[in-house]
Image: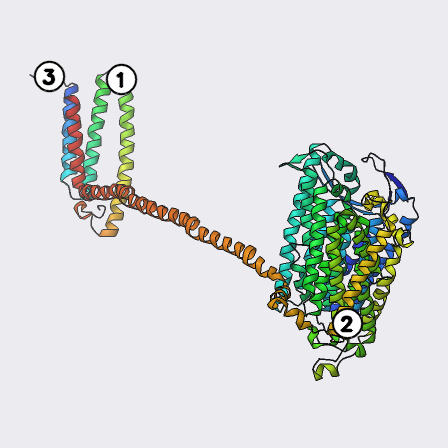
Amino acid sequence: MTAVHDAHTAHEAVVHGTHLLRWIPLLPLIGATINFLGGRRIQASFGRFGVAALATLMPLLSFVLVMASFFQLTGLPVEERTLVDYVAPWIHIGSLNADIALQFDPLTAVMTIVITGIGSLIHIYSYGYMDEEPAAWRFFALLNLFMFAMLTLVLGDNLLIMFVGWEGVGLCSWALIGFWFSEEANAKAGNKAFIVNRIGDFGFLLGLFLLFWTLDGHGQSTIVFRELATAAGALEGETLWGLSVATLVTLFFFVGATGKSAQIPLYVWLPDAMAGPTPVSALIHAATMVTAGVYMIARMNFLFTMAPITLEVVAYIGAATALFAATIGLAQNDIKKVLAYSTVSQLGYMFMAMGVGAYAAGVFHLMTHAFFKACLFLGSGSVIHAMHHEQDMRNMGGLRKYMPRTFWTFLIATIAIAGVPGTAGFFSKDEILWKAYLHHPALWAAGFAGAGMTAFYMFRLVFMTFFGECRADEHTREHLHESSGWMTWPLIILAAGSILSGYIGIPPALGGSNPFEHFLEPVLGGHGHGGVHGHHDLMLEYTYMAMSVGIATTGIFLAYLMYNRRLINPDWFSRAGGGALYKLIYNKYYIDEIYYGTFLNGTIGLARMLSWFDRTIVDGIVNGLASITLVVSYINGRIDHYVVDGLVNFIANFTGWFGGVMRRFQTGSINAYLYGIVVVVTAVLFASTW
Amino acid sequence: MLAEVGLHHFLFVGLALFCAGMFCVLTRRNAIGVLMGVELILNAANVNYIAFSRYSAGGYDGQVFSIFVIMLAAAEAAIGLAIVLAIYRRFHSIDVSDMQQLHW
């Protein structure tokens, strides 16, 4: 191990070189390549187990490497906790220097542990879940490719490498959502995810360009994160269009984050993404890809801290999303749709944390959420698998008896997401709510209401699915069974994580020291405390903690009364206000329809207009030119025919006629020739003497 | 009174010979007759050469030229008779008025 002094940074930050990091993303890429190229043959000769074993081994090995790097990192002094793997030079144009280089610091460590750890579990689960899939090799290849892209995203040490991963996860998401592409709805959902993500990516690119452009103007051209932290100081006081450049750059980056992390207004793709196989939903749409936006903001926290306006926007968008998605979740009947809106809502909490400057709290929630949301999705997958791809909760019920392992793990994860004290969700969500309250009570109120709804709809889901009478038809009920060990063991591990992962970040108010936050401090800095560290009222914090526990309990109790004991008829709520409110929520506020009516029809209308313009104006000009050319060439042809050819023919005809005249002199009679000669010679003689 | 024979006498003999040769060439229908006419014309020219050579200070040039003309006449006669033979083989006639194939 060698200590490399980075010459560019003012503080002479010490980083440690390594050649291990490149294998973390590379191993899944190798797995993906093998399965893409030869997976069909492997599956033909070794069965599904062959491709699955290969595909699972790769992220597992990556996980081992991540853990090795993690322990190497913790063995270093706090201020030197950055491993850098310089792989190869890449783009050097003008003042732009982007190299293929990976970095591993505490934030990356958290992300990679989540990605490879939970990712590996999901790979194992997928073997059980995709047990009737003829194209399993394609599925596992795509999963591995996705792991590669996501690991590139979080390991990249500059913005361009991050962007490569950023686009890569979008691509894999598209391919995996539309995995069963023979059904048009699935293919369309994949397209929707990709297109909506592209809108966000456009923002990301604009932010990247503007940032580089401005820094370049100050001679500070760099896109490497470590160097940006100091170079970003050059943005101070810079303005563009009356806004500070820092604000603009971060707003653009935030647009990118809303696309990837499904925030208002670009969240619409995530619920539709449930069209993909359930392990995909767990991997991409709960644990990893959707956290890319949160990770990106945490990675560039120094930049966002410079832009208070952006932070306000982030916080309020996050709070709005948390509340908004939670209300939609109240009325959904598709088990995966509920979880999808719950994901959108939980991501809103993370953004709220980012917006109030509590970066560590946001990342903490990201990690705990990854555990319980992966567990929930995989649990729902187990249910869907047992129910023969039935996803409507109204046709479930009483599954507790048939699938106890799935039930218990699902229940634990539900308790965690509801924020019951002692679970991971409680610690992380409560910290966010408290930080939000310190920033502005309105944010807290939105998060508080959202937390209550989360508890309600999650327990509504549990009661409708696992309790009561089984509402499935006879045939399905006969085949109800607990899923295989391939599926239940990952569930058990994730359920354990849903509880235990919270204990690494117990806040001081509860007697802990929050080692998680301290671990992240070198990256997220002291401002991770939102500038309110220290002198706050402990009693107040306990009060608010009690309140959030109270609302969670209320939500759970209400769900119990409505969907288990049936003491309150749910219809009473759905009919309130003439049923209009319920209809509004049930139809997801008609956002999809509004987008369809405005943006989609707008785009299609514009395309039609342009096509009309093309066909009439542009084609008209082209056709007109063609017609003119035709007329000109006709005239030209006539001139050629009559004038040029006429002249040539005239000369030929004249020559012919003249020859005809002259040949009469050639009689063939030798006497005549001789007379001619004599006459002419005599004439010449006379003429010359005359 | 009889004058001494001079240049003019010879020139008149040449003229007579030329006219006879020309008349022969123009009137004969027999190809050999035509050739004979040509010979007469060439010899008219010879007479003139010799006469000029004798009566003017030209040295022997005229006589040399007449030798050349005799050679030329011999060659012309050889080739001309060969052609006449070939024509006879082809047409079984040596009448020049029969030979009008060379026209258009």
Viewport quadrant of the N terminus of chain A: top right
What amino acid type is highlighted by mark number 1?
Gly
Contact? badges 1 and 3 (CB < 8 Å): no
Residue drawn at x 27%, y 37% is: B76
Q: Which mark is residue B3?
A: 3
**Residue type marked 3:** Ala
User: Could you tell me residue A599's position as x and y percent?
Assistant: 56, 55
Residue under mark 2: which chain is it in? Answer: A
Residue beneath disc 1:
B58
Task: Please tell me which residue lies in front, A258 or A136.
Answer: A258
Tell me which label, 1 or 3, sits earlier in the chain.
3
Task: Residue under label 2, please give it.
Answer: A560
Q: Chain of mark 1?
A: B
Label 1 Cα neighbours within 10 Å, binned few <14 / some 14-19 / many ≥20: few
Q: Is residue A522 above or below residue A132?
A: above
Secondary structure found at label 3: loop
